[in-house]
Amino acid sequence: MHKTTKVKPILVILGPTASGKTKLATAMAQRISGEIISADSRQVYRELNIGTGKDYSDYLINGKLIPYHLIDCVNPDESFTVSDFIREYDSARTHIETQNKQAVMCGGTGSYIVAALNGLTYDGIPPNNNLRNQLIHLSKDELQNYFTSMPRTAVHQTADYNTVKRLVRAIEIAGFLNANTSFKPAEARQTPAHIIGLSLDNSERNNRIEKRLITRLQEGLLDEGERIYNRYGYHIMHRMGLEYKFMALHLSGNLTYAEFYAQLLTAIKQFAKRQMTYFRKMQRDGMCIHWINAELPLQQQCEIVMEHLS
């Protein structure tokens, strides 16, 4: 008889942008002897610091650094896919658990979290470069319309609509599945997890987003954008989305400062709304998320999480 190895549950802290995920995850990591695994699709890139919210000071508690993983992994002109994330996530989790510590995954990229917990069922589907070249000039709305007009496949149930890159991949997968009806996706994995979500009402979330954007501009967001623009160019920066996309448009002369600020603020608010939509979808697909009011004091949030873990 084979001996079954019991997999230690991972603690997951998720929520929309500006909800205070990192502070809660770090505070919990200190309490339960944990290390952070970031689930943020943009914080993996070096040099994208202010715009992606790499608040390194959040990882310091009483002068002690809480170890973190999957931040500053690749350069902005390098590719980093969900498959890359899974590989690095598995490596980080093994490293953490061999030290008898608790892995705490923290982030707002829902597709990363789902992939880490449930696996990548379509990882074996190869890229279609000809199709990608045809889609590269389409806007996100055009890509979404293209995708929803395709014959329904299993990937339509799980697709992430948040970025152009993920929509292109979803179209690629759907096209492959329609052309290869005998394809069998990889077996899913089921990682036990305690999933905590931070929620805010729309008004408070939008207020936090605006205050944070003002702070980041004061901290030198545009200076960071100019350095990246000069080093990597418009297209790389535009591909990074949100702050970097709109900074690229501003720095290239396509937007005035006022237009840049107004359009970026609207885009971040819309992004946070899409994040919540994706998290709700995760729940509909069977993931149990225990929601906590993000307006509660940090200490109280921690007590609620501790009670949930017990």
Image (tube, grey):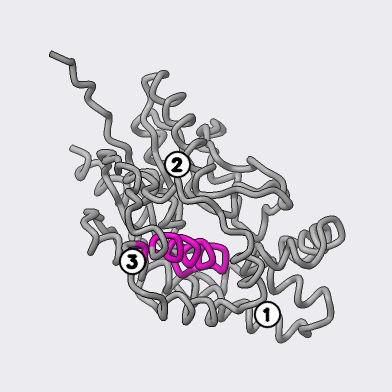
Residue at image mark 2: 26
Q: Is residue 295 visible?
A: no
Residue at 73%, 63% (x, y): give it.
237
The region drawn magenta spans 155-177
Residue at 31%, 62% (x, y): give it.
154
- In the image, taking residue 68 as reference, residue 273 lies left or right, namely left
Say which label, 3 or 2, has the lower sequence index: 2
Query: Which residue type carries mark 2?
Result: Thr
Residue at image mark 1: 261
- 166 in the magenta segment: yes
Query: Which numbered tag is attached to residue 45?
Result: none
- In the image, taking residue 94 as reference, residue 5 lies left or right, namely left
Q: Quadrant of the C terminus?
A: top left
Q: What element carries label 1?
A: helix
Badge 2 density bin: few <14, some 14–19, many ≥20, Cα 10 Å: many
Q: Is residue 71 visible?
A: yes
Q: Distance between the residues labelled 3 and 2?
A: 39 Å
Residue at image mark 3: 153
- x then y, percent, for residue 249: 75, 76
The single residue placed furthest to the right in the displayed view is 230
Query: Which residue type carries mark 3?
Result: Thr
